[in-house]
Image: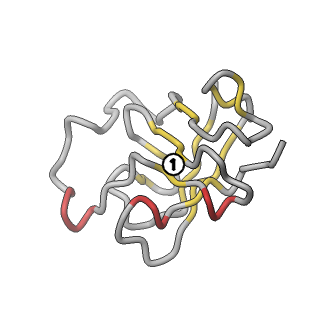
Amino acid sequence: MIKINCKVENCSHNKQGSCYSNRINVGGKGAKTDCNTCCGSFLDKDNYSTLTNNTNSKGECNCLVCEVNTCAYNDNKSCNAKTILVSGNNVNIYTETNCSTFKLK
């Protein structure tokens, strides 16, 4: 089971540094660095703070779909890292987030 840590403080799924989304999608098919990746599940809490149908009420998110074909942890769209870190500063849209765990194959 994967642990998803989040440093994107303004994401509506972030609860004390852990992701509570039902599922996250990491994008960046041809990424060469973590800056070329993103968390497609990011929702700005200023706009989506009352959104509850996409938030996991049973606990932290442990479901991750990875579209980053160039990442060493991608195993047929599943992440085989034990933990990942999603990061980003002053994020307004999902493309400004990064999967900091990314490792080029």
Label 1 belongs to which residue? 18
Q: How many marks?
A: 1
Residue 37 percent across, percent down from the top left: 59, 54
Q: Residue at x 63, y 31 (%)?
A: 2
Q: Quadrant of the C terminus?
A: top right
Determine the residue located farthest toward the left in the rendered image. 50
Q: Is residue 12 above or below residue 65?
A: below
- Classify residue 93 by image quadrant: bottom left
- Classify residue 100 by image quadrant: bottom right
Q: Is residue 23 above or below residue 39?
A: above
Q: Is residue 58 above or below residue 40?
A: above
What amino acid type should be assigned to the residue bearing mark 1? Ser
Determine the residue located farthest toward the bottom in the rendered image. 90
Horizontal side of residue 40 vs 73, given as left or right: left
Q: Residue at x 27, y 62 (%)?
A: 45
- Classify residue 72 by image quadrant: top right
Residue 48 percent across, percent down from the top left: 20, 56
Q: Residue at x 69, y 40 (%)?
A: 83
Residue 51 percent across, percent down from the top left: 18, 47
Residue 68 percent across, percent down from the top left: 63, 41
Horizontal side of residue 53 vs 44, given as left or right: left
